[in-house]
Image (spheres, rainbow, N blue to C red):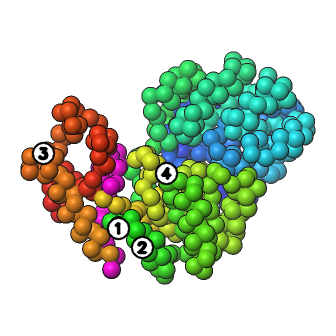
Amino acid sequence: MRGIKHAGFEDPRPIQLETVPAGLAGRDVLGLAQTGTGKTAAFALPLLDRLLDAPRKGPRALVIAPTRELATQIAAEIRTLSKFTGVKSVTIYGGVSIQGQINDLRRRPEIVVGCPGRVLDLLNRRLLHLGQVETLVLDEADHMFDMGFLPDIRRIMAALPKQRQNLLFSATMPKDIRRLADDLLSDPHVVELADTAPASTVDHALYMVAEPRKRELLERMLAGDDCNSAIVFTRTKHRAKRLADQLSKAGHRAVGLQGNMSQSQRDRAMRGFRSRSYDILVATDIAARGIDVSGVSHVINFDVPNTPEAYTHRIGRTGRAELEGVACTFVTSSDRAWVKSTENMIGSRIPRRKVDGFEHDSDESTRHERSAGRSRNGGKPRRSGQKYRGNNGNPRSEGQPRSGRRNAGFRPGSGRRTR
């Protein structure tokens, strides 16, 4: 309780209110909730309470997260909550020297927080012993599946005692994660607070822009009086590095965060952004989940995400802890299929907005989308629910490119005039 007060917690968040009692009772828990909703404390508090009841050394809890940044953040919050308990924790992940982590494990910490690859590496070297683990936590389980970690997780589970508490938290529940949950959990307490729609605290919109003018529109957004701190998302690592360099040369306090950076470089970038040495973080989807930086006023999708699901995770980096935030997504005429899929996923139309001087980009996209919608259906707008057909006349899935040509036309609705 002293740790909770020290962390500044006053009232429990919904996911904590719904899962902490079951966790304290020793039940398995399946918690579905968006990132930024307080899931770390939801599993950390019952975990710490159990460790205090019967203190002994050695790893008794294993927390697995998909990225180094998220693992580091989880470990930091656990240290805050356990500040007055004497419980020790260690963080293990790749990209840094393994020797320091081996030394930390020799101090027999009660909690191990790590990424699947390094956890499995230490297990194979017989330097990490999980025979006393009483609680297993999988955080952002759906993202771990997206990253291909499911086989590693199953191998790690095989090294754990069969009698243990399992806590699985995820933002979405695809079929493969549902199967993992069925294999992992025994009579779980299920809490479903996940919502594919963006948080109500985020004002999000699409901005139509030609690809060559994206940088110009970004500068306009960053110059706004209300833009105090921004995360700018790009699709590729090279684009993130180039854009961060361009913004720095233009006089912005910008830093990149992408997978080609060493762990020490990534740590410095995050520390600088958190401490406000940098106002702008240009990142790939490595920062789309779990990264919690208070006071981010804007998220700007310089490129649309690869999947509709990533949209809510990206823009969830702002509007956190019940503060308000702004999310802007730059959309070109080739992003039509992504827009349709994303709007279907969140269940509503994303507002379109214009910026002075960029009206031509929006008008061109609207004309392009209407033309594309008519040409594919004999000059008539495509009916809602009608499937696209490829060059051979066979149905194809939404968003699948036509054979021999690029996707063309940005069409937010069903081919009809946008109202």
Write the residue at 73% across / 58% down. Answer: 265
Separation of residues labelled 3 and 4 (CA atoms): 35 Å
Residue 264 on image: x %, y %: 76, 56
Task: Estimate the spatial distance between the alpha carbons at disc 2 and disc 3, rounded to whole Å.
Answer: 34 Å
Q: Residues within 10 Å of mark 4 (few under 14, many from 20)?
A: many
Q: CA distance from mark 1 to mark 2?
A: 8 Å
Q: Does label 1 or label 2 sit earlier along the sequence?
A: 1
Q: Of the residues shown, which amino acid type is indicated by label 2? A: Leu
> Please, what is the three-letter code of the amino acid marked with disc 3?
Asn
Q: Is tag 1's residue or tag 4's residue first in the polypeptide sequence?
A: 1
The label shown at residue 217 is 2
- Mark 1–mark 2 contact, CB under 8 Å? yes
Disc 4 element? helix
Which quarter of the picture shows residue 366?
Answer: bottom left
Judging by the rendered image, the residue that carries numbered circle 1 is 209
Percent of width and height locating residue 326:
45, 67
The percent position of residue 36, horizontal first and vertical second, equals: 55, 53
Give 82 or 133, whichever is nearer the viewer. 133
**Residue under label 3:** 377
Measure the alpha-carbon separation of dots 4 and 2.
23 Å
Residues under numbered marks 1 and 3 in contact, where contact means CB atoms less than 8 Å apart: no
Q: Which contiguous range is marked in magenta?
A: 334-357
In space, the residues marked 1 and 3 are separated at their CA atoms by 26 Å
Q: Does residue 349 show up magenta in the picture?
A: yes
Q: Residues within 10 Å of mark 2 (few under 14, many from 20)?
A: many
Observer-nearest of 1 and 152: 152
Quadrant housing the C terminus: bottom left
- Specify which label sits upstream in the sequence, 4 or 2: 2
The residue under label 4 is 313
